Image (cartoon, rainbow, N blue to C red):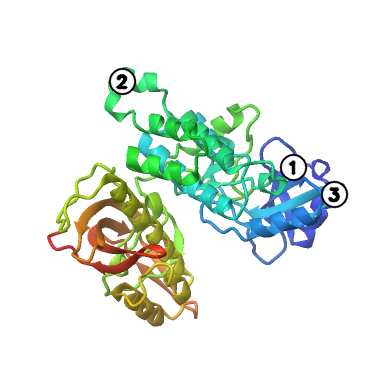
């Protein structure tokens, strides 16, 4: 873009960090994608400028913001004061269309697709709220759907102004999701009255006195099962970007990069660096079929089945619906955190996933020892289902997870790379135990019957 359109202090800041503005994002004149320059290959970043005084309050909010790490929230790299009472927020660049662009290029999202978007974004908001922050700008043009269908909440400037509130964020998220669904009249006219569940569930959340992000998660899980988000072809997205007056008018893919948005294959996985081993029976999982952990032998990630799914092989009698929803949500969260711990090769992080002294913890620690820092690149998990599978005499709850893992590359600490083939679907049972810290993983086992 023309250099005169970029403020001098922004140009200097980026130059000092080895980047130059490559494209504008949106139309407010204060948000750009910056490309690395020079011989050393780097990664693009985004710079978001907000007018706020650089005082003690800003430093406090900036410290809180930089401390929030969530896979569905754009990662903050730095907060730097500029001239004339402005601040630059440097964040990771997230390629892909916004939810607004995606909706403009295709029919309304199904309830299942909307769940796949709503729950991860709600969890990202929950992480902000837990840190004492609010996003203050949740909207369809502030949610980017990566080419692999992974939603990310972007534009974190509102967190530095302190102008938002947690319940306001939740209501904006509900409005955003409702805006990409088909009108209820259209669903009824199509003869689908039994499928009109997500809209009223979310409307109930918005009507609450102080709705929370977890309310969105619970309502979405109870209303519909997640489905992969269909990404339109690049030409359809390009037309939508031009047509959206007042919204983002430029693609978010880095300048000079090949088109990243494409017609997606029906795969539910998210690509994340995770550790994979062969020969053990460890469950894996991901939130909404997108936040995977891994298993040796390629087992991975629970999606979520409707709360009405019938328990099987129960030894403790029927499970109340609210407990069943709680257990499924815990299984999703724990498998996400397990993936992050294994990806980071962090034994300490596994303490927040497993019951102390449990068989699952012992096997994961052995796994980390054996892998010795090896990681996986391009790993994507496809989740077929997560189904309540009863309980045990000790009061533990069992969840059956059916999933598969896409082809990926294992990389050792010495740089040796090994191709790992895609695995077929298989089922394992995740045994959860309630502790003073909430549900934790006690064991992972083969199902009693044929998978």
Nearest the viewer among 434 and 235 is 434
User: Residue 251: percent from the left, percent from the top?
Assistant: 60, 41
Dot 2: what SS? loop
Q: Is residue 244 visible?
A: yes
Residue carrying label 1: 30
**Crowd around label 1: few <14 · some 14–19 · many ≥20 (10 Å):** some
Q: How many marks?
A: 3
User: Residue 123: percent from the left, percent from the top?
Assistant: 48, 50
- Inter-mark Cα distance, 3 to 2: 55 Å
Residue carrying label 3: 8
User: Residue 376: percent from the left, percent from the top?
Assistant: 43, 68
- Inter-mark Cα distance, 3 to 1: 12 Å
Vertically, is 34 above or below 201?
A: below
Residue carrying label 2: 190
Residue 105 horizontal side relative to residue 115, left or right: right
Nearest the viewer among 57 and 94 is 57
Vertically, is 240 above or below 312?
A: above
């Amino acid at each position: 873009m023309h250099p005169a359109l970029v403020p001098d202090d922004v140009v200097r800041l980026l130059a000092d960090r080895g980047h130059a503005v490559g494209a504008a994002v949106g139309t407010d004149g204060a948000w750009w994608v910056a490309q690395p320059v020079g011989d050393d290959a780097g990664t693009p970043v985004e710079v978001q400028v907000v007018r706020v005084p650089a005082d003690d309050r800003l430093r406090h909010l900036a410290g809180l913001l930089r401390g929030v790490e969530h896979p569905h929230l754009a990662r903050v790299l730095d907060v730097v004061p500029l001239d004339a009472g402005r601040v630059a927020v440097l964040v990771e660049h997230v390629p892909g269309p916004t939810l607004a662009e995606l909706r403009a290029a295709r029919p309304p999202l199904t309830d299942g697709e909307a769940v796949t978007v709503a729950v991860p974004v709600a969890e990202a908001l929950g992480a902000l709220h837990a840190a004492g922050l609010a996003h203050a700008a949740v909207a369809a043009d502030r949610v980017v759907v990566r080419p692999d269908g992974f939603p990310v909440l972007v534009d974190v400037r509102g967190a530095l102004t302190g102008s938002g509130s947690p319940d306001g964020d939740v209501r904006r998220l509900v409005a955003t999701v409702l805006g990409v669904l088909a009108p209820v009249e259209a669903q009824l006219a199509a003869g689908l009255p039994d499928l009109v569940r997500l809209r009223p569930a979310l409307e109930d959340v918005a009507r609450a006195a102080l709705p929370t992000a977890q309310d969105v998660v619970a309502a979405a899980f109870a209303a519909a099962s997640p489905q992969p988000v269909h990404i339109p072809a690049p030409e359809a997205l390009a037309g939508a970007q031009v047509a959206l007056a007042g919204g983002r008018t430029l693609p978010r893919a880095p300048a000079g990069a090949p088109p990243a948005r494409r017609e997606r294959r029906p795969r539910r996985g998210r690509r994340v660096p995770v550790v994979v081993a062969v020969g053990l029976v460890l469950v894996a999982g991901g939130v909404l079929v997108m936040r995977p952990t891994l298993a040796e032998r390629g087992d991975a990630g629970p999606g979520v089945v409707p709360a009405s799914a019938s328990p099987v092989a129960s030894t403790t009698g029927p499970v109340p619906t609210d407990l069943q929803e709680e257990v499924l949500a815990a299984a999703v969260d724990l498998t996400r955190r397990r993936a992050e711990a294994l990806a980071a090769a962090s034994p300490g992080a596994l303490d927040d996933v497993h019951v102390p002294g449990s068989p699952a913890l012992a096997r994961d620690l052995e796994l980390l020892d054996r892998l010795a820092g090896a990681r996986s690149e391009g790993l994507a998990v496809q989740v077929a289902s997560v189904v309540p599978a009863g309980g045990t005499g000790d009061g533990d709850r069992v969840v059956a997870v059916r999933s598969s893992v896409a082809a990926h590359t294992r990389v050792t600490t010495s740089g040796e790379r090994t191709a790992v083939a895609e695995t077929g679907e298989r089922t394992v049972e995740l045994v959860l135990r309630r502790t003073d810290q909430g549900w934790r993983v006690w064991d992972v086992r083969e199902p009693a019957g044929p998978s």
